[in-house]
Image (cartoon, rainbow, N blue to C red):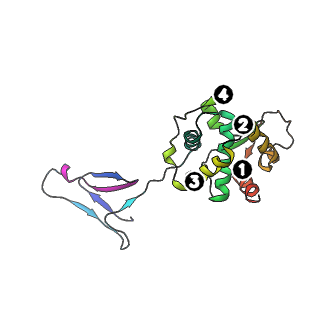
Amino acid sequence: MKANTRTDIPLTYQKENNLIFFKPNISSATDSTLNVTLEYEKEDHPAFAYEPVKKVTVFDVAAYVLKRLGELTTMKLHKIVYYCQAWSLVWDEKSLFDEEIEAWANGPVVRRLFSYHKGQYSISNISLGNPDALNEKQKETIDSVINYYGDKSAQWLIELTHLEDPWKNVRIGMEPTERGNRIITNESMAEYYSSL
């Protein structure tokens, strides 16, 4: 809505099916006169609504993976999350989450997720994540990744990432066990996995 909006009474909102509806709170008016002025452009409708945009985080993706697969080693969780991001870039042409993926010695790792579970060998729950934050398309992508990679061991997944260009190219010039924090870009993942 592009308009001048003036009201002498507060506006309230009601959330319904992920939509927020704004309306005058008539019960809070102090007299019988309601003084509300709303100006709309022709294409706008007075019963306007908008869908709030919530960014999906790596924690939401990890929480969904754990909900589907149960407890995992943290190494395996990072590799599954990595492949979820990679295949989302190919199949959906957009990233699942904004957090960066780094090329560590044991394969791709999301530092923010690592910081959350640091010191744990395995994990069964991500309290910062909300699996319901994902839309159906995102869940479908993750489910496909889980169906292919979910029964593989952490070591198998580590070795696979070490054979693939996004991790290999970022690690050029580094020793195999050398710590590293170089970023595996979304562009490199999209280019490589779309060519398979």
Q: Residues within 10 Å of mark 2 (few under 14, many from 20)?
A: many
Point out the tag, 2 or 3, that comes first from the N-terminus: 3
Q: Amino acid at mark 2?
A: Ala
* Real-space CA distance between mark 3 and mark 4, rounded to the nearest whole angstrom: 28 Å
Q: Amino acid at mark 1?
A: Thr
Residue 154 bears which disc, if any? 2
Point out the tag, 3 or 1, that comes first from the N-terminus: 3
Point out the tag, 4 or 1, that comes first from the N-terminus: 4
Q: Secondary structure at mark 2?
A: helix
Q: Would residue 54 be counted in the magenta stretch? A: no
Which residue corresponds to the image point at 72% horizontal and 37% vertical from the top-left? 153
* Real-space CA distance between mark 2 and mark 1, rounded to the nearest whole angstrom: 22 Å
Please report the bounds of the magenta region as a residue range: 18-27
* Real-space CA distance between mark 2 and mark 3, rounded to the nearest whole angstrom: 22 Å
Q: Position of residue 24 (x, y in %)?
A: 25, 55
Q: Secondary structure at mark 1?
A: loop
- Counting the numbered discs, the total is 4
Q: Amino acid at mark 3?
A: Glu
Point out the tag, 3 or 4, that comes first from the N-terminus: 4
Residue 121 bears which disc, if any? 4
Point out the tag, 2 or 4, that comes first from the N-terminus: 4
